[in-house]
Image: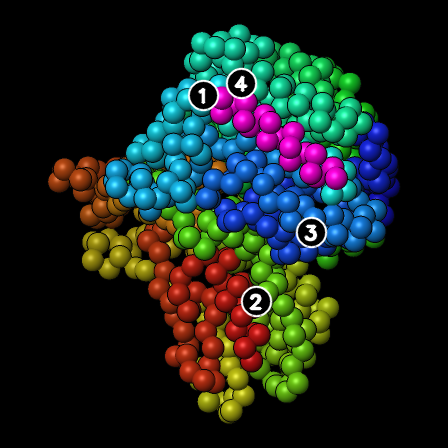
């Protein structure tokens, strides 16, 4: 192991609870021990994932947050005693790993509860609202400190919690903590004065306008969180450790308005001056650890950093707040292990929190410790599999129900939280399988086939593997994507998969009766009806190195177009975005943390954005566009990049012998490519 990492593997204590190393797997929705958005029960899939993280080197493991009041069917978490009995039977197996377990308990979501279109329909119809109340009582689960707009929807408002309800929540935390302690759990984490969840909403001045003992003064706004830990300690004893998930700074300008790194703004929530006072106040109330990052749901990219956010984005603020408390402090959020080790070595933080990397590669800690970091499958910070709640103008959370009910899956690892259907089984009938196309889909299919005992052969027309992912990973800030590409290429070498480069296949007939996987990708959509379209530069051509001028018009404001515009701005150029829809990145599967960063970045930097605008003509030195009201506008530019989308280009149609994967099977994202390739490889 690299000596720089040594401090990550030193022991430490939270209260009297000794932890073997400084690696903390922080909580992720979907990795719950008692189920997620369903009737509470001991969840075997969640338990298996938690156990795997512990066996693979995590020191402290925090499962997905458990609402003490379940949004579905309105159950109190302490009411099902059997699941605690099941947990108690499982805990000895967990403790064999040497790790410690804190279960994260939450008061709920308040105005941050993710409202979908179906939920809106239930709420706005009085009859449906009444009928659905036993299943999902929106007035209860969306209630907050004071009447406030929901983060996702204007149709489902949040009312104020009553004092009686607050008292019920405080009592529920204590009751659940007692049952968890009796089951053998090492501690609990209270979720959260963090990320703009319900407890945090009470602390934030822009949300809390109460005039009782839970509003107004500093002490009143933090009273709810303080009374919870006092109740837990009274019920469980002072030696039972209680951590607090804590956002150091809200980084929030107001409702649905975040503050980007480097932006000058007026803090609407908790600023550093208040945080210094709050951290000490919460410690004195009884909390034994602060598990820190930044942000709220209004500034979601701080708590769930996309690839555009700086590495270690929360570290400096966490290091600062550590000076004001005497309890351990953990930092999380796009944390670099080496930088974390340095901060621990210098006494600036006590633990390093990681989450999504455990989804991408559960063995990453042991690989890092063994000096095999090149073997770690990297998280690319995409949120496509783990947390793809998306939002754009005119819709609430636009997410498939299956994704809403099954979080904590992973775009780059099809097996994560899906081992019931995605797991390697050896074949009893090995076959030679031709794979036409060496992009990510082709390489994933080859990897799984080889692990199953088949003999895959990749035929790639270019002199390198990677396909369009080479272009997709080329932008300056996409180092994680380039790491993934390197990982796949290394897998081809380590598994001794035959790869034939510079070999273009024109017909599948040459493979006889052998199975064939076609992964030939897609072709760009060409706007042939637009005069001057031949002057445009296709997005992949630009990403592969074709030069552009200073002012660049990007035709298409989806994710690809916006990422290109972002990269151009970082280069010092002047992008202009033209989009036919009424919002940028108006597409499913792109997490609000990712999309809101880009939208707010362009607004901050005053990047010209023309919505509900169509390209009419490409001229020499300008473009002509047609706006919603029918008017035309000429926009000067030096270059024009087409991000108009792609069309599947399969070499052959799917049949019993032929299987399509990747974009030739349908345009999607990396998740759809990898999961489909995995599933096809398992079918053969």
Residue topped by disc 1: 162
Residue topped by disc 3: 86
- The residues bearing labels 3 and 1 have C-alpha atoms spaced at a distance of 34 Å
Tell me the residue at 54%/38% (across/down): 76
Most frequent secondary structure within the magenta stretch: helix
Q: Is residue 66 magenta?
A: no
Whole-percent x, y for residue 512 in the image: 51, 92
Range of magenta residues:
164-182
Residue topped by disc 2: 421
Residue topped by disc 4: 203
> 158 left or right of 636?
right
In terms of secondary structure, where does tag 3 sit? helix
Whole-percent x, y for residue 681 in the image: 56, 74
In terms of secondary structure, where does tag 1 sit? loop
Residues under numbered marks 3 and 2 in contact, where contact means CB atoms less than 8 Å apart: no
Q: Earlier in the sequence, mark 3 or mark 4?
A: 3
The label shown at residue 320 is none
Whole-percent x, y for residue 311 in the image: 63, 36
């Amino acid at each position: 192991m690299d000596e720089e990492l040594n401090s990550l593997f030193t022991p430490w204590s939270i209260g009297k609870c000794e932890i073997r190393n400084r690696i903390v797997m922080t909580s992720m929705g979907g990795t719950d021990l008692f189920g997620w958005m369903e009737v509470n029960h001991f969840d075997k899939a969640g338990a298996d994932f938690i156990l795997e993280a512990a066996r693979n080197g995590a020191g402290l493991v925090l499962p997905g947050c458990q609402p003490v009041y379940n949004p579905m069917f309105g159950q109190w978490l302490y009411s099902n005693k059997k699941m605690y009995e099941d947990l108690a039977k499982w805990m000895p197996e967990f403790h064999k790993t040497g790790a410690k377990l804190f279960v994260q308990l939450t008061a709920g979501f308040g105005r941050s509860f993710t409202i979908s279109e179906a939920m809106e329909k239930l709420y706005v119809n009085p009859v449906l609202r009444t009928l659905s109340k036993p299943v999902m009582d929106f007035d209860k689960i969306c209630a907050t400190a004071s009447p406030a707009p929901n983060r996702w929807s204007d149709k489902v408002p949040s009312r104020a919690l009553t004092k009686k309800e607050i008292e019920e929540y405080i009592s529920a935390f204590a009751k659940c903590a007692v049952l968890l302690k009796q089951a053998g759990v090492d501690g609990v984490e209270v979720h959260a004065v963090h990320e703009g969840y319900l407890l945090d909403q009470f602390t934030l001045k822009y949300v809390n306008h109460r005039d009782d003992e839970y509003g107004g003064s500093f002490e009143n706004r933090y009273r709810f969180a303080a009374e919870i830990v006092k109740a837990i300690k009274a019920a469980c004893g002072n030696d039972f450790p209680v951590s607090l998930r804590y956002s150091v700074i809200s980084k929030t300008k107001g409702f649905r308005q975040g503050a980007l790194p480097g932006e000058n703004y007026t803090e609407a929530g908790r600023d550093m001056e208040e945080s210094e006072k709050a951290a000490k106040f919460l410690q004195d109330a009884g909390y034994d650890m602060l598990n820190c990052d930044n942000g709220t749901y209004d500034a979601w990219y701080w708590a769930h950093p996309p690839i555009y956010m700086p590495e270690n984005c929360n570290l400096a603020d966490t290091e600062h707040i550590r000076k004001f408390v005497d309890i351990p402090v953990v930092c999380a959020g796009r944390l670099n292990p080496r930088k974390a080790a340095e901060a621990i070595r210098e006494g600036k933080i006590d633990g390093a929190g990681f989450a999504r990397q455990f989804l991408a590669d559960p063995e990453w800690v042991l690989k890092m410790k063994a000096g095999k970091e090149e073997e770690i499958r990297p998280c690319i910070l995409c949120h496509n599999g783990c947390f793809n709640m998306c939002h754009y103008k005119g819709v609430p959370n636009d997410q498939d129900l299956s994704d809403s009910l099954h979080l904590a899956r992973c775009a780059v690892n099809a097996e994560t939280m899906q081992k019931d259907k995605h797991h390697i089984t050896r074949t009893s009938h090995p076959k030679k399988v031709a794979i036409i196309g060496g992009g990510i889909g082709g390489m994933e299919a080859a990897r799984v086939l080889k692990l199953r005992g088949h003999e895959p052969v990749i035929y790639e027309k270019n002199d390198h593997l990677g396909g369009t992912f080479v272009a997709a990973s080329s932008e300056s800030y996409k180092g994680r994507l380039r790491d993934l590409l390197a990982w796949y290429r290394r897998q081809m070498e380590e598994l001794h998969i035959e790869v034939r480069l510079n070999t273009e296949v024109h017909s599948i007939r040459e493979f006889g009766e052998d199975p064939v996987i076609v992964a030939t990708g897609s072709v760009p959509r060409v706007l042939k009806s637009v005069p001057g379209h031949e002057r445009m530069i296709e997005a992949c051509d630009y990403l592969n190195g074709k030069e552009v001028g200073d002012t660049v018009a990007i035709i298409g404001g989806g994710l690809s177009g916006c990422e290109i515009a972002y990269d151009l701005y970082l280069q010092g150029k002047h992008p202009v975005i033209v989009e036919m829809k009424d919002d940028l990145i108006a597409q499913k599967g792109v997490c609000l943390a990712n999309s809101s960063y880009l939208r707010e970045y362009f607004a901050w930097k005053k990047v010209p954005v023309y919505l509900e605008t169509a390209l009419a003509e490409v001229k020499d030195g300008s473009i002509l566009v047609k706006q919603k009201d029918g008017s035309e506008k000429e926009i000067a530019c030096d270059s024009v990049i087409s991000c108009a989308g792609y069309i599947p280009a399969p070499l052959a149609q799917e049949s019993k012998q032929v299987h399509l994967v990747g974009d030739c099977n349908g345009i999607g994202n990396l998740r759809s490519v990898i999961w489909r390739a995995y599933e096809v490889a398992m079918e053969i």
